[in-house]
Image (cartoon, rainbow, N blue to C red):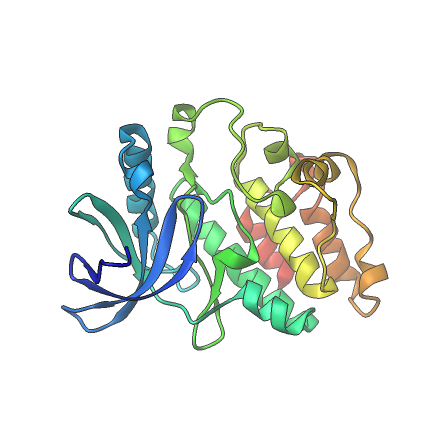
């Protein structure tokens, strides 16, 4: 990519991130003159027909979502064998905010959580479970609002049977117990991950720590989260109760729908 200055009608400006599937660049759409985030699939994955089919299907599903708290996907395409998604460019992420500031005020934490829950709700209406909700995938717009990004490993519920049984996808610190066990997941797994993020925003630290990813996953399945009141005594009991319900080990006792959580978080 060092020699590559353009992909399609996008001029590469700088590399900004890399994940498990793709490299993300800040780029300029030369036709429209706007700056975008250009997610380019790794060449070795683009050469796998089965993976490519899944990537393109999921990219198109992400592009079908229109919501103020979801990053807009402008285009899904390919140029000379390079497959890409062009997305709305966001200047920051919740991960950056937490790194810089540690814990956040209660009102700000609840506002971010409400916005993410709203995004999960509209995705759920499209049959999509994100499966990798974490601060790095919550981008912050210029107006300070949160927008959920990277549905790259999301699966529409109707396509779930097309994935290998027991395949674990996601990030260990934010995985639900059922996801950690490699079981079938649904929107309640995303609600659990959002609960982990809300705990982190309020406490300034994650509820589960361990030396290895496997040990972290075991804590998700077997260890109760530390009481939020110990890490952040000024958190109102009602807010602590919302976090605790999101982090229930049994999915049946969590909030069952994102809208239910939005209502609990209030205005």
Q: What residue appears at the point 80 percent right and 42 percent down from the top-left corner?
A: 224
The answer to whether residue 135 is left or right of residue 217 is: left
Q: Position of residue 17 (x, y in %)?
A: 42, 58
Residue in front for this viewpoint, 152 or 10: 10
Residue in front for this viewpoint, 253 or 156: 156
Q: Position of residue 183 (x, y in %)?
A: 58, 27
Residue in front for this viewpoint, 5 or 227: 5
The answer to whether residue 100 is left or right of residue 3 is: right
Q: What residue appears at the point 67 percent right and 48 percent down from the top-left corner?
A: 246
- Quarter containing the N terminus: bottom left
The answer to whether residue 44 is left or right of residue 173 is: left
Displayed quadrant of residue 214:
top right
User: Would residue 192 be visible to someone looking at this image?
Assistant: no
Displayed quadrant of residue 104:
bottom right
Look at the picture and state if 214 lies above or below 106. above
- Quarter containing the C terminus: bottom right
Look at the picture and state if 41 lies above or below 233. above
The residue sitting at the bottom extreme is: 143
Q: Position of residue 138 (x, y in %)?
A: 50, 60
């Amino acid at each position: 990519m060092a020699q590559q200055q353009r992909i399609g009608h996008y001029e590469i400006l700088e590399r900004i991130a890399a994940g498990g599937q793709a490299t993300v660049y800040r780029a300029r759409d030369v036709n429209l003159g706007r700056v975008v985030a250009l997610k380019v699939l790794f060449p070795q994955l683009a050469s796998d027909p089965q993976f490519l089919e899944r990537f393109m299907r999921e990219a198109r599903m992400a592009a079908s979502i229109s919501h103020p708290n979801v990053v807009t996907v402008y285009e899904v395409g390919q140029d000379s064998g390079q497959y890409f998604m062009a997305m709305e460019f966001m200047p920051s992420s919740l991960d950056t905010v937490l790194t810089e500031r540690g814990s956040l005020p209660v009102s700000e934490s609840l506002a971010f959580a409400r916005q993410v829950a709203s995004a999960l709700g509209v995705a759920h209406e499209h049959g999509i479970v994100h499966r990798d909700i974490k601060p790095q995938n919550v981008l912050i717009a210029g107006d300070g609002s949160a927008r959920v990004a990277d549905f790259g490993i999301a699966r529409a519920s109707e396509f779930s049977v097309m994935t290998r049984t027991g395949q674990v996808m996601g990030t260990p610190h934010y995985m639900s117990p059922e996801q950690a066990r490699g079981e079938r997941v649904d929107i309640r797994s995303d609600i659990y991950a959002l609960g982990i993020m809300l705990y982190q925003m309020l406490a300034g630290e994650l509820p589960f720590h361990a030396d290895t990813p496997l040990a972290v996953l075991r804590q998700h399945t077997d260890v109760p989260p530390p009481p939020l009141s110990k890490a952040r005594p000024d958190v109102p009991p009602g807010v602590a109760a919302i976090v605790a319900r999101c982090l229930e080990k049994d999915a049946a006792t969590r909030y069952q729908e994102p809208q239910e959580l939005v209502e609990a978080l209030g205005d």
